[in-house]
Image: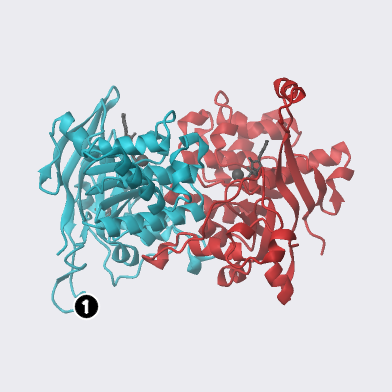
Chain colours: A cyan, B red
Amino acid sequence: MTETVLSIDNLQTHFFTRGGVVKAVNGVSLSVNRGEILGLVGESGSGKSITGFSILGLVDEPGRIVGGSIRLLDRELVGLPDPELRRLRGGRMAMIFQDPMMTLNPVLRIETQMIEAIQAHEKVSRKEAWTRARDGLAQVGIPSPEERLKCYPHELSGGMRQRVAIAIAFLNRPDFIVADEPTTALDVTIQSQILAEAQKLCRDSGTAMIWITHDLSVVAGLADTIAVMYAGRVVETGAAAEVVAAPRHPYTSGLIRSVPGEHMTGKRLFQIPGMTPSLLRLGAECPFSERCFARTPVCAQVPDLVPDLVPGHGATEEAAIGDNRHPRAVRCHHPLSAAEPLPTGPLSAELPS
Amino acid sequence: MTALLDIRNVSKVFRTPLDGAEKLANLVGANNREIRVQATDDVSLSLNRGEVLGVVGESGCGKSTLGRTVAGIHEATSGDIVWKGKALSQMTSRERKAYVLAVQMIFQDPFSSLNPRKRIVQAVSEAPVAHGLISRRERDDYTVEMLNRVGLDPSLRDRFPHQFSGGQRQRIGIARALAVNPEFLVCDESIAALDVSIQAQIINLFMDLREELDLTYMFISHDLSVVRHISDRVAIMYLGRVVELAPTSELFAKPLHPYAEALLAEAPDLRAGKRTFHPIKGEVPSPLNPPSGCHFHPRCPQATEICKAVKPELREVAPGRQAACHLLSDAA
Ligand SMILES: Nc1ncnc2c1ncn2[C@@H]1O[C@H](COP(=O)(O)OP(=O)(O)O)[C@@H](O)[C@H]1O
Ligand SMILES: Nc1ncnc2c1ncn2[C@@H]1O[C@H](COP(=O)(O)OP(=O)(O)O)[C@@H](O)[C@H]1O
Ligand code: SF4
Ligand SMILES: [Mg+2]
Ligand SMILES: [Mg+2]
């Protein structure tokens, strides 16, 4: 049986700034199963980090969750008082940041920090906590963990520091972890080591994870499911392999086709015209409409995120794409059909007016 | 055919000498030593006119140093750059000036190289006016022409850099480089800071410009899929040395050097689907203290005794293919 660990429904987190209300998260819905990884992708400013912060209860003024629900197992997190959120953080849920120094204290030895992290949530002896800390480091591929435990963060390389931060996040076998671009600053060979370790830890500990990245290629190799964000909303979600193989939303499709690949060598890349809209001035229309090749007059209304039904997908009757565990959903009035050939070439000049 | 640009045995060493306090401390028995980094180590590459040479490798392997040496920003510690048959070290100051204009560099963050108080029209037309390529009166028309060429709305030319998005700023950086009629562009991580959809726009622009202006590129990037897309040949660097050089399609079909093989296997690939990772062990060693022999030997699954002791030379190991690996030279 698959168990849904985290489910978010219509989450809205807004920033009340002097310039106006920034709708950073404007109706996000997604869910993650036990032991699985959801890749949350989208371009910068689309609301990925704020979605992560909202789950952990880390949104600061002038930001506020103004609507929606976040359920961790059977518990509603929206509206939970701060002390209770703090108890959950580092225990049942944790966050890994792009900069590991957000987690690590520069003036304490790794040992001290890890033992404290364990003892804050569990009554165990120092000796036992130390053993768990050492095993935690070994699990993320840190050579000679006993010696590293005695180090201060600045004595480690960037890749090592990130591994320590990951080990700390997993220390108390949390139900859920958000990892926010944890390998973006690292080199390919180090990134690949860390992806391998994260994948294994989730599988072994049953932790559900949201892996935030702007790099579709990373989640294609790592994640079980994908949620694509645009302008504060999830526009498409489903099993990772299916979304990448047959994107339904014009934005997802554009993103995938703009990544260089073997078959494209030397040719012009597909390009999505224009750039992302300002979150301060979102109107009633589909926020992607000004860049979209498929738009029609109905796109003046924001579409809902609806379960994806495709006529004649394999069989003659309507069948939902996706297995039951990873339902597919898309937020578009004119989702691309799996069979329909994708438009090729740069479309900037061919936008409908 | 002589190469347009020939990099001959170029090495660059950065030295950070001891400061006064460290020297004093040494007098009383401390052992402070000058910091010495060999950023590039005997690199030889040549580029033909119209060609795109990709340069890849992990951070600190010397890509930027090589690019800056080619662009005349750094002086090589040893070796020489030969431009159209003439060595940089032999050039008159006049020839050298022409060279510095002919070879332009495009950086990762154009913002840092754009003066925040200068309007775009100034940023773009400054150098061509200073070098007498255009007269002051032609500044405005010339800027319009350059902005059109890079796909930027010319009516924005009186704005300041901060009023532009990342992708637009990169277009401004490119327009500024093109304004001095270069023949050769060194692109150093020029699209790394941009979002995917904007990356595609800029890559397309580079490819269009190559055709329109018959440009030659040295395209430096840590992103293998981008390099594969745009390059005719690719050089892979590790700790200051070129370890493999090959035509792009052949390299990606079958990398020969063990490091090249590991790097290609581990690059994330959108179309490969979910996978189990089998990464190579360890990290890139510190360039302050590089391993003996082949720099890659501590991480190499196939290393033997000779790899620890002897530096492998970059040499032809198959027709059109060069690699620096004992394993391959023995077989050849
Ligand atoms: N403290 C803040 N005040 C105002 N706006 C903010 C604040 N933090 C984030 N935002 C806005 O929220 C939007 C989403 O941000 P973020 O979640 O960080 O995007 P991503 O992680 O996808 O790049 C951005 O447009 C950003 O400008
Ligand atoms: N100006 C400099 N002074 C001292 N060391 C430098 C300087 N520039 C680069 N280095 C060193 O040279 C090595 C190669 O750096 P770089 O060429 O920037 O590599 P890459 O661009 O491949 O990341 C690194 O170890 C770096 O620290
Ligand atoms: S709703 Fe309309 S404008 Fe928006 S993505 Fe779908 S087709 Fe394009
Ligand atoms: Mg972010
Ligand atoms: Mg560099």
Ligand 4 sits in quadrant: top left
Q: Position of residue B243 (x, y in %)?
A: 67, 60
In this picture, residue A351 sits left or right of residue A305: right
In this picture, residue A153 sits left or right of residue B28: left
Residue A76 seen in the figure:
yes
* Residue named by callout 1: A314
Identify the subunit bearing mark 1.
A
Q: Position of residue A211 (x, y in %)?
A: 33, 50
| Quarter of the image with the N terminus of chain A in it | bottom left
In the foreground, A257 or A187:
A187
Q: Is residue A176 above or below residue A240?
A: above
Where on the picture, by quarter, is residue B305? bottom right
Q: Position of residue A136 (x, y in %)?
A: 36, 49
Where on the picture, by quarter, is residue B57? bottom right
Q: Position of residue B21 (x, y in %)?
A: 70, 20
In the foreground, A179 or A316:
A179
In this picture, residue A131 sits left or right of residue B224: left
In this picture, residue B19 sits left or right of residue A342: right
Where on the picture, by quarter, is residue A123? top left
Q: What's the residue at 32%, 47% (across, down)? A: A132
* Mark 1 residue element: loop
In the foreground, B157 or B328:
B328
Mark 1, residues whose alpha carbon is within 10 Å: few (<14), some, or many (≥20)? Answer: few
| Callout 1 amino acid | Gly
